[in-house]
Image (spheres, helix red, strand yellow):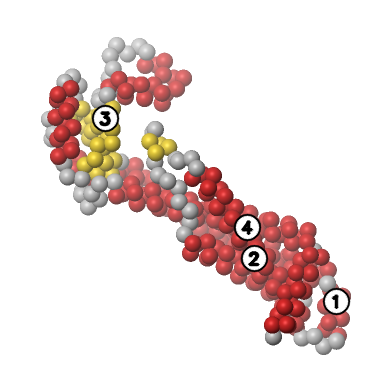
Amino acid sequence: MLARLAYFFKQAIQNMAQNRWVHLVGLGITTIAILILGAFLLLFVNVDNWLRDWGASVTMSVYLEDELTPSQITKVRGALLSEKGVEIRRFISKDQALKELKKALGPQSDLLEGLSENPLPASFEIAIKEPQKDPLVVKEGLERIPGVSEVQYSEAWIQRFEDFVRVVRIVGAVAGVLLCVGVLFIVTNTIKLTIYSRKEEIHILKLVGATDWFVKLPFLIEGLMQGAIGGAAAMLALFAIYVALSANKALFLGFVLLDIVFIPVSYVAGIMLLNTILGVLGSLMAIGGFLEV
């Protein structure tokens, strides 16, 4: 049994070597298709992590009234810290707020030169570390602190972002199905070309009494190997992209936002298994046109 299996693998490897350019082209396209699918998964995994982190830590901007003295600002800081679950990330003075606005406007910052006074308020950027708290209740409580003029928080923006992510997920699912169909098509045609190149040899094998499965198995193994190698190559390429991206942390408004994480091992195994199955299915579709199952 092992000797026969070794023979089938040997035949498959010989077939791939004899038709190496066809297999290399097919393998390259398959790898790119699975890499795109993996990139979608990498995006979704990180987006889910970001949403969980943002949901667990609602960010708020606490704007202060004008003309507060340093001692009054200190009292506001103390009042904020006295609120359970509140963490102050930074204090932005009026001058600093104006500088950041000018930096954000870039070449159009000249529009601010005509201002007689700085209209921007000082503010505290805070995070609510207790997700069970109702942000609206927290917001109303903070606005009652003497010296606080207004509180804005990030929930509305997060909701819009979640709606956008839902659309992207649907697009990703459709793209994933199309990519799988593409991989199936590529493998099928690659194996068909291999069968054409061995048409006379297959005819001779049938004449001397070889069974259908004896002829088919090397081609099935070819499809299996092409799928497995393509899946592994795609995951290695995806990991290289992840390493390059994770070396530079994502920045948002001058802050380190979140680290980029790689897809779970179960996803990696699932993608490789899926590509291997597609390789076998593609081989079955190819040989089905030449030999009766």
Q: Which residue is mark 2?
A: 227
Q: Is residue 24 left or right of residue 147?
A: right
Asked which quadrant contains residue 289, the reply is bottom right
Under mark 4, the amino acid is Ala
Give yes or no for contact between labels 4 and 2 (Cβ–Cβ under 8 Å).
Answer: no
Q: Is residue 196 left or right of residue 49?
A: right
Labels 1 and 2: the sequence-earlier one: 1
Q: Which mark is residue 226?
A: none
Labels 4 and 3: the sequence-earlier one: 3
Under mark 2, the amino acid is Gly
Give yes or no for contact between labels 3 and 1 (Cβ–Cβ under 8 Å).
Answer: no
Assess disc 1: are there few (<14), some (14-19) or many (≥20) residues with their C-alpha within 10 Å of its C-alpha.
few
Residue under the image location 51 percent in, 58 percent down: 173
Q: Quadrant of the N terminus?
A: bottom right
Q: CA distance from mark 3 to mark 1?
A: 79 Å
Q: CA distance from mark 3 to mark 2?
A: 55 Å
Under mark 3, the amino acid is Phe
Assess disc 2: are there few (<14), some (14-19) or many (≥20) residues with their C-alpha within 10 Å of its C-alpha.
many
Q: CA distance from mark 4 to mark 2?
A: 10 Å
Q: Which residue is mark 1?
A: 201
